[in-house]
Image: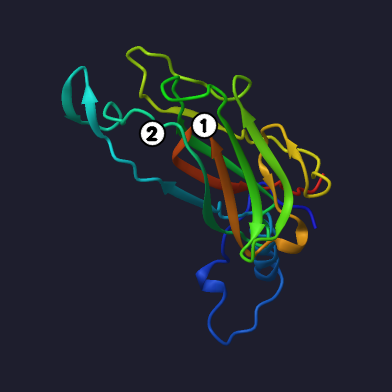
Amino acid sequence: MLVPTSFQPLANEQSCFMGVTVMGGVVNQFAQALVNLSHCKFLGSANYTIAKPTDGLLAGTYVHTNWTGFAAGLNKSSKVYNFFYASTPLSEWIGFIFQYVATRESSSNSPQITFRIKTTSGTIISKAVLFTYPAHLTINDENADFFRPNLTSSGATFYDPPSGTTGTDSPRPLYIPLSNRGDMLLLEVEVEDCDLLSISFFDFYQAEVTP
């Protein structure tokens, strides 16, 4: 059946009473509505903020601000974060946007962030994605933007599904294999020589339409 470009979302109320048999045009309207619903999807998403202390000294003054008060060395971290993500049966690619901080103070100047997708039991189900400096990440210098967070993302481009679960790819959305779609998943983020402040995950899919 062709997917109509213009349709009535529901049949006329006067044409379909409870317990009354319907036929003809009313049935066709219901069928068209169901076909359109099969090509719609509610966007799944998850948003996380990582709490950080923001009090510290700035130019000899003790301050409490959103970002300016980051204590020296806070950006130099090597840790692993795990975030839950409830996928849907239609979920295929998970994109993400994240904030991070990386400065030259107390840093080896080589930040990198690795994203992995796992089952809740910890099994890796898809190839990891790696962000590195200076190709994908930025280090703030000692100036007015010293402690300001940076923002970057995976993008939202469709790729060929990655093969295997070992190694890393350049930045791209995370891929969910068919057998794991609809499962509760763990999205692992490993940071080195930088730190994570917030992250938002969202899934998108390739729509199938009638030519």
Identify the amino acid type marked 2: Leu
Classed neighbour count for the residue bearing mark 2: other residues with Cα under 10 Å, few (<14), some (14–19), many (≥20): many
In the rendering, at what x and y percent does residue 7 appear?
63, 53
Q: What label sits on residue 29 in the rendered view? A: none
The residue depicted at 68 percent of the width and 57 percent of the height is: 90
The location of residue 28, given as percent across then percent down, is 70, 65
Q: Is residue 121 left or right of residue 43?
A: right
Up/down of 188 relative to 32, above or below: above
Q: Quadrant of residue 22?
A: bottom right
Badge 2 marks a residue whose secondary structure is: loop
Q: Which residue is mark 1?
A: 193
Instruction: Check if mark 1's residue and mark 2's residue have beta carbons within 8 Å.
Output: no
Question: Sequence-wise, which precedes: disc 1 or disc 2?
Answer: 2
Residue nearest the observer in this picture, 187 or 40: 187
Q: Is residue 183 above or below residue 148?
A: below
Q: Position of residue 60 (x, y in %)?
A: 18, 19
Quarter of the image where the C terminus is located: top right
Q: Secondary structure at mark 1?
A: loop
**Dot 1, crowdedness within 10 Å: few (<14), some or many (≥20)?**
many
Q: Residue at x 54, y 66 (%)?
A: 12
Q: Residue at x 38, y 33 (%)?
A: 74
Q: Which residue is mark 2?
A: 74
Amino acid type, label 1: Asp
**Vertical placement of residue 12 versus 116, above or below:** below
- Relative to residue 60, is residue 124 depicted above or below? below
Image coordinates for residue 196, horizontal then vertical, percent: 46, 38
- Classify residue 202 as left or right of residue 183: left
Image quadrant where residue 181 sits = bottom right
The residue at 78%/46% (across/down) is: 166
- Which residue of the protein is positioned furthest toward the top in this rendering? 143
Quarter of the image where one finds residue 198? top left
